[in-house]
Amino acid sequence: MLRFGRVGEYIRPYVFGILISASMKITGSLVDLALPYITSIIIDDGVAYGNVDIIVKYGLLMLVLSLFGAAVTLRAHRNAVRISQDFARDMRNGMFEHIQSYSLGELEKISTSSLITRITNDVQQVQQLIMMTMRMFVRTPVLALGGSLMAFILDPKLSVILLVLLPFLYLVMNYTLKRTKPIYKRLQINLDRLTVVVRENLTGVKVIKAFGRQEYEKERFRQRSKDVMDSELGAGMILAVVNPLIALLMNIAVIAVVWFGGIRVNAGGMQTGQILAYLNYLTMILNSFTNISKIFSMCTRAGASGNRINEVFETTSSIQSPEHPEKLDHGSDIALAFDHVDFTYPGDSLPSLQDVSFFIERGKTLAIIGPTGCGKSTIVSLLTRFYDPDQGTVTVEGQNVKNLDLKALRSAISVVLQKTILFSGTIAENIRWGKPDATQEELVNATQIAQMYDFIENLPEKYETRLSQGAVNLSGGQKQRISIARAVVKPADILIMDDSSSALDFATDLRLRQAIKARIGHRTVVIIAQRISTIMNADRILVMNKGKVVGFGSHEQLLENCEIYREIYSSQMGGVPVNG
């Protein structure tokens, strides 16, 4: 699923890290060798006496090794940055690809706002850890272990100070990890909540302004932002204690080395140069532990983010294509059918559909009508297999939808959803979502059917007119008609229009239905609507109420035997139904 780059690219920074550590160890050892000579130099009237040649020799060698170490460090850091960014890119791509396989049930389980935070901020935390690890993870432990070994070799007695110091360093780092781990978990949750507020404010800006709720929303945002700040501040305050504590321990150790080392120098047990060398190793060791504590603190935060990322990958779609899918039976007389279907949305206690059965022949028009919340749109979700029924069978072109490949099933169905969604880009790009290789002639034909042709032709850039995000520069009816054109241009056998003409006036709605019948009458059409005038000429009309089928037949048949249909007809048409 993920492509993490070539193995050599990931090993290379570690090799460079080892080279850096080795060059620094050698340089440090040369310092130790040179210190006794430095301390033995005698200055008399500006003239140095002693082993000056040896000092120059070691000094030049140290300079060469330092330059080598600097060059290798630069290359290692460049590799670390590039590879960590490659890793983050592949992780984001893998997450996005995996999320695309989710059914609507999984998308409701992990909220959209949380997925946005996970694919951005959580991946960034892991990426930063990888970069820091590649830059420091090999180098820092090698310096710590190498420095400790050299310190013990140089003077085992003074190394007792290190043995006393190490438990205190462990306690500091352990305290940091335990205290920051729950804080970082809470921080990521607070980021999710902040993202929710931002999304709701940006998508619902018209509602907020219409109801004058700007101050309320500002306060809600400030509170969520404060929660994030408090979490960050809580972790920051704990981490802020770590460096001073390590510095305190370092200074105490330095004092101890100077104190006990001075006593031994006075007693003739060691030289001044050895104390300086030992202090050099001690500083190296303690700086290494400071870096290790930083890595551990990053591990804590990245660990919380990593768990959230793993949750995305471990959540698999409950709706999958079968291993051996069947093919659509394009010769079937029945285009689609429901057979005793029951369905309840995840988390709901009341069923949305109960014992629903109906069918429609190929090339015919099925209309679905009923009160709000009666299950009309749920039928569309089951037909396109966004959900699977709890009981019963849904068939499309003679095959159970569970036995069909998801891509093949959804390619055979073109849907105009109840909620119109257009994407940033040109009008042509949005229509070509239905058919990426659609010709200009096909675009014109689709917009003529959708009653959008005249409007587009009067635009300065016509089909290349750019739409803003959410197509806020179009009216509701214009957006609906572009979404209809997008569905019409798709070469699908079944066209579903889920209350897609609600923003159209009666005259435009009539012309739209006439154009669909005249130009794409060979397709099976499913129309979900609230208007009797929109559906009364359909071949079959399905009347829903409280998730149940209460009527199925032609307009005339329903007027005779379906009370709910007669009530809807009477309320909208303003007259007494035939034979009523």
Image: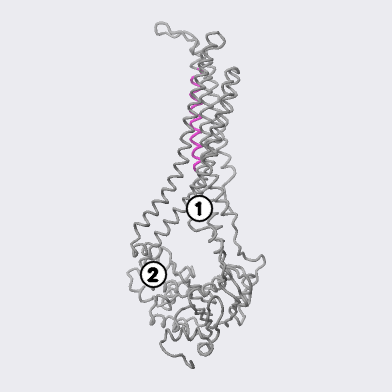
Res. 130 in view: no
Q: Residue at x 62, y 77 (%)?
A: 340
Count neighbours of disc 1 (C-alpha within 10 A) and say few if under 14, some if 14 to 19, many if 20 or more.
Answer: many
Q: Which residue is drawn at 52% across and 42% down?
A: 129
Q: Quadrant of the N terminus?
A: bottom right
Res. 48 in view: yes
Which residue is at the front of the view, 430 or 569?
569
Counting every numbered tag in the picture gives 2
- 212 inside magenta stretch: no
Which labelled disc corresponds to residue 93? none
Residue receiving disc 1: 119
> Measured from the top left, where is residue 321 in percent x and y?
62, 65
Task: Answer above or below: position of 228 versus 507.
Answer: above
Which labelled disc corresponds to residue 463? 2
Q: Which residue is situated farthest in the top direction here?
A: 44
Does label 2 or label 1 sit earlier along the sequence? 1
Q: Helix, strand or loop at disc 2?
A: helix
Q: In the rendered structure, which segment of residues is drawn in magenta? A: 57-81
- 68 inside magenta stretch: yes
> Measured from the top left, where is residue 489 in percent x and y?
47, 74
